[in-house]
Image (cartoon, grey):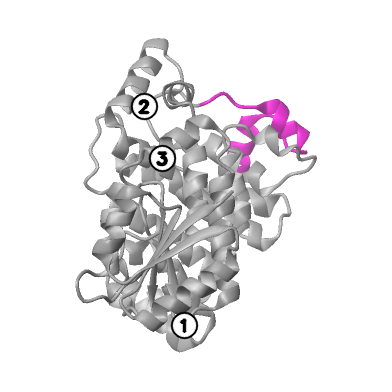
Amino acid sequence: MKRTIYIVDDQSEVLETAVVIVRGLVPDSEVTGFAGPHEALAAVRAKPPDVILSDQLMPRMQGSQLLEEVRTLAPGAVRIIMSGYVAMDRLNVITSAHQYVAKPFDALQLKELLDRIFAAQQRIQDEGLKTVVTSLRSLPSLPQVRHTLLAELADSYGASATIGQMIAQDPGLSAKVLQLANSPLFGRSFLVTSPVEAVLCLGTTMITAVVLSQALFKHYNVLSHRESSLRRLWSHCWETASLGQIYCREQGLPHAAGEEAFLGGLLHETGRLILIDNFPDRFQTACDAARRDGSPLGPALRHTFQTTPAQIAAYLLDLWGMPSNVVAAVSLLDRPQDEKASKFTLASALYIADQVASRKSSPDAFPPAEWDAEYVRSVGGDGDIGAWQRNEVEGVRRPG
């Protein structure tokens, strides 16, 4: 499949080099360079690209502003910011890009990024998901936090201290990071009292989960819908994340799986937020249908949109560059048996955590989805959901 890629940079030598590099990385593609944002916008109107890469610092229009325009004109296009340097305290301003690429380019990393983007687009086989994705007018764009800020965690104590100080400036984020660091899950014999200590204790994946989820819910802070409470949805996500980590540990999965379960749990309801933001009336139609039938909301949403919030969330997490295991686990939330696993996996933990959390801290006012006891037994788990609820209590009280 031939891809259309646009590159925008006001420095002619950089632009020419970038075009040559990308053409070499993606041979079967149409790569066009533009020296200014207005020329690029005209091209987007004439032919929406699959991907657009834009320099951030340009005289007539910053890249973030350009990509904001592209978001409206071509919501299906993947938007990437290129920059040699963006100050840490400016990262949250760039919310119009799906990805952040540093200049000068690392050809291997850029190729991996483009390959992942095209793979995510190619995986949209379901027509309902494709229809929803291509008609979105708004899609949250938060990966620069992960790629630029959190990547520095592994470099030095100084980097961790800087990130900890940034987190300390946000009371809500700081509280969540400290809450997690002092969770019984970790069985620490000491109290973590500062965000800097928390960053050092938790590591990249866990901090990524908290930062991204907090940024996501802030992105939707002004979202108002009578059928959805952000506070309620956040509580459900936090509960799912915590339970997912507990179940991974209790079932003997690797430590990394527990961290990935936490990340997936915090972000698994992203699709619901996207649907409410982009299609409030159709979302309400689904709610009305579920209420008339006295049924869970999930089937009504599937009927209305011909896809599910979990599938939409998985697509976005794929674009954000989240771990493939997390993307897969989120995509399987509606049909975990499609994994065809014969043993307990990350997807199993996330499915069970979501089910238990829905009964303990429901994301909405509708009945929870039906529990698939046969699937749980097929992966070696107890088919009684009550047993998992009891294990959850024991798991919190018995630190690992």
Image quarter for residue 103? bottom left
Q: Which mark is residue 271?
A: none
Residue kind at label 1, given as amino acid type: Pro
Closer to the chain start, of discs 3 and 1, is: 1
Give the secondary structure at mark 1: loop
Number of residues whose C-alpha sits closer than 10 Å to that of mark 3, classed few (under 14), some (14–19) or many (20 or more): few
Give the secondary structure at mark 3: helix
The one nearer the camera, 243 or 273, is 273
Residue kind at label 3, given as amino acid type: Thr
Q: Which mark is residue 104?
A: 1
Number of residues whose C-alpha sits closer than 10 Å to that of mark 1, classed few (under 14), some (14–19) or many (20 or more): few
Q: Kindly report the distance in space between the C-alpha atoms of the residues bearing marks 3 and 1.
A: 31 Å
Image quarter for residue 124? top right
The one nearer the camera, 150 or 230, is 150
In the rendered image, the vertical position of residue 116 relative to residue 84, given as above or below: above
Q: Which mark is residue 134?
A: 3
- Find disc 2 in the rendering and name its residue: 365
Q: Which residues are magenta?
A: 369-393
Of marks 2 and 1, the one in the foreground? 1
Give the secondary structure at mark 2: loop
Image quarter for residue 37? bottom left
- The x, y position of residue 164, in whole percent, is 38, 77
- Work out which quarter of the rendered image holds the C terminus and state it: bottom right
Q: Kindly report the distance in space between the C-alpha atoms of the residues bearing marks 2 and 1.
A: 50 Å
Furthest residue to the top?
292
Magenta stretch, main secondary structure class: helix
Q: Is residue 34 left or right of residue 254?
A: left
Closer to the chain start, of discs 3 and 2, is: 3
Q: Kindly report the distance in space between the C-alpha atoms of the residues bearing marks 3 and 2.
A: 29 Å
